[in-house]
Image (cartoon, helix red, strand yellow):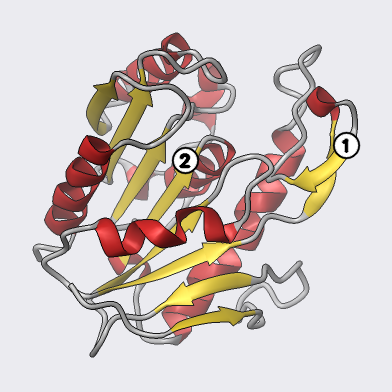
C-alpha cells in the first residue's frame, strides 16, 4: 500500500493540554484513514525506530501511524545515563517505575485525544508498543474507559501483573490483544511475557500469542502476523 506524507509534529493534546506534549512522527495514508495506530518505541530508541515498518506491512485498509518520542530521563539500570525512556528501570526495585508508567500513559492518552479531534474515535485507534512502549500501551489500553480497536504488545510484559485486576476497566474486557515475543530474548525473558499473557487470560482477555526464534527484536514473520491482525481489527 502506498504511504503518504511523513511529518514531525508537536500538537497540543485537546484533553490534556496541561500535561507534557510528546513530539512525534506522523505517517498519513493517501485518502481518508480508516483508523490510527499509535506505536511506542523501546528504551533508548525514538519514534523513528519503527517508522520503516509501515512500508513493510501489507494492509488492506489505509491507516494513519503516529510514532511519539519518549522524554529523555536518567535510567537507573544504565547507570543513570540519560536517554529516551517511558519510565525508569531499577533492577533493585522492579515495581518502582509505576508512577512513570502512569505519567507516560497520560501523555499517550493526549495523543489519543488528538486523534479524536481529527475525527478518529478511540474505537478506531490501536495502541502498539515494543518493550517499554508495550508496557505503557497495555497500561493505557487496559485501564481506559473507552475501548480501543486493539492493543499490540511486542517483546514486553504487563507491569505488576499480580495487581492487574485493580487497574483494568470494564470497557476493555473484549479488546483484541496481540502479544509476540522472541524465544531467545536476553532483555525481557519470554517467561515474563508468558506470565503476563496468563494474567490477561485469567481475566478473560482475548490474547493472540505468537513467539519467534529471535532475540529482543522484530522479525519478518512477525510483521506478516501484525499486518494480518491489524487488518482484522479494522474489518468493521
Residue extending farthest bottom: 31
Position of the C terminus, as image quadrant, is: bottom left
- Residue 70 sits in which quadrant? bottom right
Q: Nearer the viewer, mark 2 or mark 1?
A: 1
150, above or below 29, in the image: above
Q: Nearer the viewer, residue 90 or 160?
A: 90
Residue 141 is situated, as x and y percent measured from the top left of the image, at 44, 48
Of helix, strand and loop, which one carries label 2?
A: helix
Instruction: Residue at 85% x, 27% y: name it.
Output: 76
Residue 3 is situated, as x and y percent measured from the top left of the image, at 29, 77
Instruction: Residue at 90% x, 32% y: name it.
Output: 80
83, above or below 56, in the image: above
Instruction: Residue at 81% x, 27% y: name it.
Output: 78
Position of the N terminus, as image quadrant, is: bottom left
Q: In the image, is 228 to the left or to the right of 81?
A: left
Residue 173 is situated, as x and y percent measured from the top left of the image, at 30, 40
Residue 206 got which mark? none
Pointer 2: residues within 10 angstroms few (<14), some, or many (20+)? many
Q: Which residue is mark 2?
A: 138
Instruction: Residue at 43% x, 42% y: name it.
Output: 142
Residue 9 is situated, as x and y percent measured from the top left of the image, at 61, 80
Of helix, strand and loop, which one carries label 1?
A: strand
Q: In the image, is 214 to the left or to the right of 162?
A: left
Q: In the image, is 92 to the left or to the right of 207?
A: right
The Cα atoms of the two marked residues, 2 and 1, are separated by 26 Å
Q: Which residue is mark 1?
A: 81
Q: Nearer the viewer, residue 45 or 143?
A: 45
Are the two marked residues, 2 and 1, in contact with CB atoms closer than 8 angstroms? Answer: no
Amino acid at each position: 500500500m502506498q504511504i503518504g506524507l511523513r511529518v514531525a509534529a508537536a500538537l497540543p493534546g485537546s484533553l490534556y493540554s496541561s500535561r507534557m506534549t510528546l513530539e512525534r512522527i506522523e505517517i498519513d495514508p493517501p485518502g481518508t484513514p480508516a483508523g490510527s495506530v499509535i506505536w511506542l518505541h523501546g528504551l533508548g530508541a525514538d519514534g523513528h525506530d519503527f517508522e520503516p515498518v509501515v512500508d513493510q506491512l501489507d494492509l488492506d485498509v489505509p491507516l494513519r501511524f503516529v510514532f511519539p518520542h519518549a522524554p529523555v530521563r536518567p535510567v537507573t539500570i544504565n547507570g543513570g545515563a540519560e536517554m529516551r525512556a517511558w519510565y525508569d528501570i531499577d533492577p533493585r526495585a522492579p515495581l518502582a517505575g509505576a508512577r512513570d508508567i502512569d505519567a507516560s500513559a497520560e501523555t499517550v492518552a493526549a495523543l489519543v485525544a488528538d486523534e479524536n479531534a481529527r475525527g478518529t474515535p478511540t474505537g478506531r485507534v490501536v495502541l502498539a508498543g515494543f518493550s517499554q512502549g508495550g508496557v505503557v500501551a497495555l497500561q493505557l489500553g487496559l485501564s481506559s474507559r473507552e475501548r480501543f480497536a486493539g492493543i499490540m504488545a511486542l517483546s514486553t510484559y504487563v507491569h505488576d501483573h499480580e495487581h492487574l485486576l485493580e487497574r483494568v476497566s470494564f470497557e476493555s474486557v473484549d479488546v483484541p490483544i496481540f502479544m509476540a515475543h522472541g524465544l531467545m530474548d536476553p532483555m525481557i525473558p519470554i517467561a515474563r511475557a508468558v506470565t503476563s499473557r496468563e494474567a490477561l487470560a485469567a481475566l478473560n482477555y482475548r490474547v493472540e500469542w505468537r513467539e519467534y526464534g529471535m532475540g529482543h527484536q522484530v522479525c519478518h514473520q512477525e510483521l506478516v502476523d501484525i499486518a494480518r491482525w491489524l487488518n482484522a481489527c479494522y474489518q468493521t
